[in-house]
Image (cartoon, coloured by chain):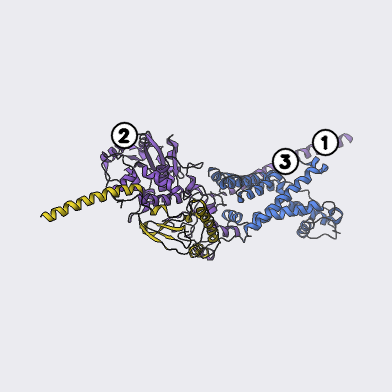
Amino acid sequence: MADKNRKHRPQALKTQQTLGDMLAERGVSRRSFLKFAAYTASILALPPTAASAIASGLAAARRQSVIWLSFQECTGCTESITRASSPSIEDLIFDFISLDYHHTLQNASGHLAEAAREQAMEENRGDYLVVVDGSIPLKNDGYSTIAGISNRQMLEETVAHAKAVIAVGSCATFGGIPGANPNPTGAVAISELTDKPVINLSGCPPIPEAMTGTIAYLLSFAGIPELDHLGRPKAFYGEAIHDRCYRRPFYEKGQFAKSFDDEGARQGWCLYEVGCKGPVTYNACATLKWNGGVSFPIQSGHGCLGCSEPGFWDLGGFYKPLSAAKDDALKYAAGAAVVGAAAGAAASMAVRAKRNKLMKAAQAAVSDSEKEEN
Amino acid sequence: MELLEFARGPALTFALTVFIAGVVFRIASLVFMWRTRDSSVGSSREEPAALAAVKEIARRMWPLPTYRHRSLFQLINGYIFHIGLAIIVFLLLPHILFIKDLVGLSWGHLPNNLVYAVSIVTLISLIAALVMRISNPAQRIISTFDDYFSWLVTFLPVLTGLIATMHLGARYETLLALHILSVCLLLIYIPFGKIMHFFLVFVTRSQTGAHLSHRGAQQL
Amino acid sequence: MPGGGAPCQTQHLTGMARAVLTEVARMLEALAADGTTASIDLRSLPMTDADREQLEASLGRGEVVAELEIAGRSTIHETAYAGAWWICHRGANDRVSSEEIAVCPVPEILASHPADIESAAVRLKEDLLENHSSQAEASNG
């Protein structure tokens, strides 16, 4: 069985073997491709009959060189995609790719690590995938550097001859937490800094199946899956949480939990009132769920944070309902009332003054004519 | 998402600020106007001003039989969309939560589906009101921009709210943003037009009631 | 769905089982008529736990059960309806990674792959040669 904890191989051996031959050498039969393909077809929402095509595509593919760049990030995306326990179907993806550069998982460090990256870029010129997590600071290149060079520079030189870029996690796709108000580092999304095709796998972190499924799709079909207007694969980000949420009937009936652990919450009622952003969030949490299908935030009793959407940290607060104002909308209310009152008084005074003037003039005219008469 | 963030954020803040400033301005400018002092002796039938005021407000909720039959449809239609709007605004949970976030008050709500049905009735009623205004020659002649625009800024939130809940035509976050922006438009326009009647009707009816009572006029 | 929903949802029968059975019936007919194979991905359907149990009970068990060890455990059993097979793939910690009902003479994954057969033939030949030479050594020594 493939050993996920295998050491980083010396880059001199760029394999021309197909994945099928590679696994066969390790005593793993072609059946594993079929099992992996069945799993992948399922999470990509492809018909089960696509599994054959995926299996043969993968078996004939070469091991894909992947360079993983980590910038302003928390490593949560790496945590999501990796497993700590025994090898499993989800780990097969690590056999199908050659993870030639990854801060957390690689063996080498320092100059050797950077040399490995450069060698992988050279040997797989035009054919490697770049996976990026974390956002890039633009305000000052010095805010985030690796091996002495800025994130921006590392991105530019690494994607120059890449086949495609996968931005993983909300930081890389939309700016994420570094990009949240007031965005002190000037953090931007990866897609703003390159013209290469970028697949956005947003989420904080993304569902692991979204990452493995997308890579498997790229390997099997040698093409990019269908993307939505934000560059996210429709297979995982095409549906809003609200439209697949099992608590939806309670929303329609108007049965809402008013606070955590109240009677409504215990009955499993809708979490709109405690801040669920499900209606405006697109992700696969309600169907694929987390930890291999165990649960997802709403099922566990907490409203959706909207973590796969741009700027979700600045939506006004995780516990503010979607219909409430994002900011303190009455911030200027007192001032507005004062201004309104003052303006109203002033307007009235102006009219009064005019009236008094007219009345005085009229009275003066009357007394003048009286004088004349007399 | 950016449009929704704008709608829920700066747009609402701006709209509410203008709304408060505008409404206070209108009320203050009335309050500080001079009042013609009526030094005449009141009729023997005069009631206390406050009582007369309240009675007049109630009295004008329903016209005298002489006038009633001519405008009955308009009257009933008016009540339908007023009550409909009240139900939509004050008895739908997401709206209650909006108010609760602003001022801390909240109360019970109706099932969402029931409010959607009321919204459809309200929309039809509003359209009927517009049709009547346009098809009646006298009304058409005297109608101003304020009449039509006030209708529009009242109609749009109900329409966009329904479209949003039905997820019709665009992504939900866009529809929700448009709904909130239409409400911002309504809030900004209220101080400038005839929708101020939501407050002023009580002022004018009170004043008329007190004045007429002073004169000894009596309801038949 | 694996993991289920809230307690109030998982024991609720929605009628999905019957819908799936109807689809399986249609596919079996097609298979009998002209050999067309088909599959239903159970993971993608909004079935509650109760629905799934009902479906499994309705389909029943046939004569064949297969256990596979490929990157985790997988089980295949023929249902009481010949040609309809229930395939359950498990991954880490024995969690279900995909589940389908395959309508076919025999699921593709059971058959040995030509490439595997080729390398197995070579390997057996080599093993035989090894055995022969070590036997020869043993008898000589």
Q: Nearer the viewer, residue A4 or A291?
A: A4
Callout 1–callout 3 Cβ contact below 8 Å: no
Q: Callout 2: 10 Å neighbours few (<14), some, many (20+)?
A: few
Tell which of A144 and C105 is nearer to you: C105
Distance (Cα) linking label 2 and label 1: 101 Å
Q: Do labels 2 and 1 touch, CB within 8 Å?
A: no
Asked if marks 2 and 1 fall on the same chain, the answer is yes
Q: Do the residues labelled 3 and 2 touch (CB within 8 Å)?
A: no
Image depth: mark 3 or mark 2 in front:
2
- Residue type, mark 2 in image: Glu
Which residue position is annotated with label 1? A365
Q: Which of marks 2 and 1 is in front?
A: 2
Q: Which amino acid does label 3 sit on?
A: Val
Q: Residue at the spot x=54%, y=60% of the render?
A: C16
Residue B24 seen: no
Residue B67 appearing in the image: yes
Left or right, residue A77 beside residue A302: left
Image colour for chain C is yellow
| Tag of residue A122 | 2
Dividing the picture into quadrants, the one containing residue A85 is bottom left
The disc, 1 or 3, on the residue closer to the chain's N-terminal end is 3
The residue identified by callout 3 is A351
| C-alpha separation, residue under disc 1 versus residue under disc 3 | 21 Å
Please state if B205 lies on the left or on the right of A330 as rendered. right
Residue C58 x/y as whole percent: 50, 64
